[in-house]
Image (tube, rainbow, N blue to C red):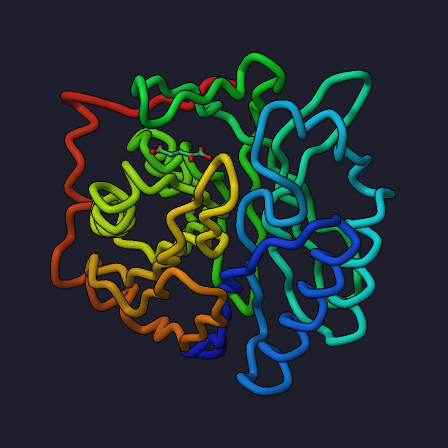
Amino acid sequence: MAPSKLKIALLQLGSFPTKQAAIANALTQIRSAVKDKGAKLVILPECWNSTYSTDEFGRSAEKIPGGETSLALAKIAEELGIWLVGGTYPEVDAGKLYNTCAVFGPKGELVGKYRKMHLFDMDIPGICTFSESSVLTPGKEFLTFSVEGLKIGVGICYDQRFPEFAAVYRQLGVDFLIFPSAFDTYTGPMHFELIAQARALDNSMFVALCAPARDTTKDYVAYGYSTLCDPWGRVLCRAGEKPEILSAELDLTLLEDIKKKIPVLKQKRNDVYELVKKK
Ligand SMILES: O=C(O)CCC(=O)C(=O)O
C-alpha cells in the first residue's frame, strides 16, 4: 500500500553575488531539509542561482542536463536519496533560452525538465515591467512524475495564473502541483496566496509555491512568502520574507477525502463543456 504521508520541504533561498555561492548555499539548505527535517522531496524557487532579469538569462544559461547547476543537484539528490524539484535556472538549447525546472530522482537521474509555458510579460507602469518573451522561448510540454504513488506536476510562477493549465494537470491525474515562483512585491500580496488556494480548490490537489527570499537591493524584488495549500484550499504553511526552510508533511488521505465529500471532479458536465489538451 502506498504511504499516506509524505514529508516535503520548500526552500525559500536567499540571494548570493555569484552562481557558485548560490549553488553552495542551496546544497547546504537541501542537506539541512533532509537531515534535520526528514524531507523526502525538496523544492527550490524560481531563478534561485542568478538575478531575475532579462539581461541575465543569456549570461547565466546552461545546458540541462550537463551544466554546473544540474550536475550539483543530481549529485546531491543521489547522495541523499531524495526527489529534488530543482527550482528554475536559465537553460540554453540549440541557441534558444528557456526558464526551466529540472527534476532529479533518488539515484541522481534527471526525471525530466519543464520549460515555462506562459512567459511573464507584465506591464504595470512605474511598478513592474517585465518581458520574458523578449528573450525566452516558451515551453509546450507538461511534466509529471510519481513519488511513492503521489502523482506530481510542475509549472513555473506565471503559469499558476492560468486555471486551464492546472486543470490539464488534473486531467493527467496529478494530485500535487508544484510551482517554483518569484512574484513581485506588488502582485504578491494581492494574488500569491489567493492563486495557490484557488488552484488547490479548483482541482482538489495540493499546491506548493516556492519563492526566493526578499532582497530589496535587487532591481526585481521577489515577494517571498512561499506557500503550501492542501486539497481543501487551506494554507498548510507559509514562509515570511526571509530565507527559510518550510517543511511540512502532506496527509495524502485528504485527497480521497475531499473527492468523496465534494465530488466536483466527477460532476464535470463534459456533455456541455470540455477542456481539450492539444497535442
Ligand atoms: O504573475 C505575477 O504576478 C508574477 C509572475 C512572475 O513573477 C513570474 O512569472 O516570474
Residue 101 or 252: which is nearer the viewer? 101
Residue 261 % position (x, y): 12, 63
Residue furthest out toward the front: 217
> Is 112 placed above or below 254 here?
above
Classify residue 229 by image quadrant. Answer: bottom left
Describe residue 106's horizontal placement relative to residue 148 as left or right.
right
Q: Residue at x 66, y 41 (%)?
A: 89
> Is 37 placed above or below 121 here?
below
Q: Which quadrant of the frame does ligand 1 lie within? A: top left
Residue 218 or 195: which is nearer the viewer? 218
Residue 134 % position (x, y): 57, 12
How many numbered markers are drawn?
0
Q: Which residue is drawn at 32% across and 27% down?
A: 127
Residue furthest out toward the top: 134
Describe residue 241's horizontal placement relative to residue 138 as left or right.
left
Classify residue 182 by image quadrant. Answer: top left
Residue 199 % position (x, y): 27, 45
Q: Which residue is drawn at 60% across and 49% down?
A: 48
Q: Which residue is drawn at 61% across and 32% down?
A: 99
> Is 50 placed above or below 231 here?
above
Residue 241 % position (x, y): 38, 60
Residue 223 or 88: which is nearer the viewer? 223
